[in-house]
Image: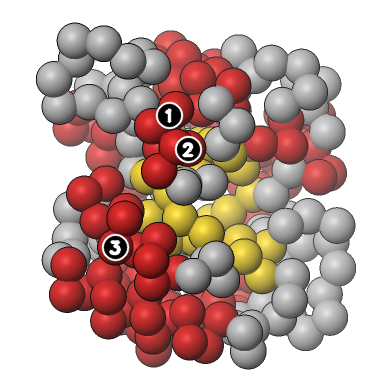
Amino acid sequence: MRRKIVAGNWKMNGSKDLSEKLVGSIRSEAGTLDKGVEVVIIPPAIYIGDVLVQAENALSVGVQNVGRWQSGAYTGEISAGMARDAGCRYVLVGHSERRQIFGETDELVAEKVSLVVSSGLTAIVCVGETLEERESGQAEAVVAAQVRAGLASVPAGKWHDIVVAYEPVWAIGTGKTATSDDAQAMHAAVRKVLKDMGAPSESISLLYGGSVKADNAAALFSEPDIDGGLIGGASLVAKEFMCICRSFPVGAEN
Ligand code: PEP
């Protein structure tokens, strides 16, 4: 059975105060969630320590990005090894904001994925098409190419440390969400690409991201190839985020 995951990407939002209150509130209800659901908090790196204290091992913690090196004279960077040392379990790699604003390429994504999994962490690898690519009928080809290139360097035996998040760029932070049918079709396509790459595709969790809210999560999470969500804006509001975490169909098995 695949892991069901709801990951909250705070982006460059939050504060010490929010880290305590929001995570404290999520953690206090974590015990009431379906046992198979893993909740991951991904705050700005500077708040990782505060979040880990509040999480009390009931929630997993991740970082939004790591550098392409493990240590050295790279002012401002943090490494995958440091993230693990600090107590993180997850790293976001290739978020569309990193690709678009910071110019990250598929090649760099592949390098980072390899460093992340070699450091004993799980990489949540983000892929997704722009509106222009969707409207011109290239969505599936674009996403398939991102999956193939971004995961080209996963070492043998490390596939269990890979999660793929399909996030259509046009849906991130816009209030527009893919229909559950379209999202399911893309997740099925991603799973097929993984299979063709020789990965254990049926055991890799695939998350949907892009304006997931309390009122659309249940429809998305009931699709057979969607194993959870990567949540931006709604992860900053405890009630909304917990509602999303409760949106898996009861007793559903993939
Ligand atoms: C994200 O940042 O990955 C994201 C999906 O954001 P939002 O939920 O706000 O669209």
Amino acid at circle 3: Asp
Quadrant where the N terminus sits is bottom right
User: Which residue does the numbered mark 1 point to in the structure image?
Assistant: 80
Q: Secondary structure at mark 3?
A: helix
Do tag 2 and tag 1 residues touch (Cβ < 8 Å)? Answer: yes
- Residue 92 seen by the camera: no
Q: Residues within 10 Å of mark 2 (few under 14, many from 20)?
A: some
Q: Residue at x 43, y 29 (%)?
A: 80
Q: Secondary structure at mark 2?
A: helix
User: Which residue does the numbered mark 2 point to in the structure image?
Assistant: 84
Quadrant where the C terminus sits is bottom right
Amino acid at circle 1: Ala
Tell whether 140 sits left or right of 224.
left
Task: Quote the CA–CA distance across marks 3 and 1.
Answer: 19 Å
Quarter assignment of residue 227: bottom right
Q: Position of residue 33 (x, y in %)?
A: 64, 83
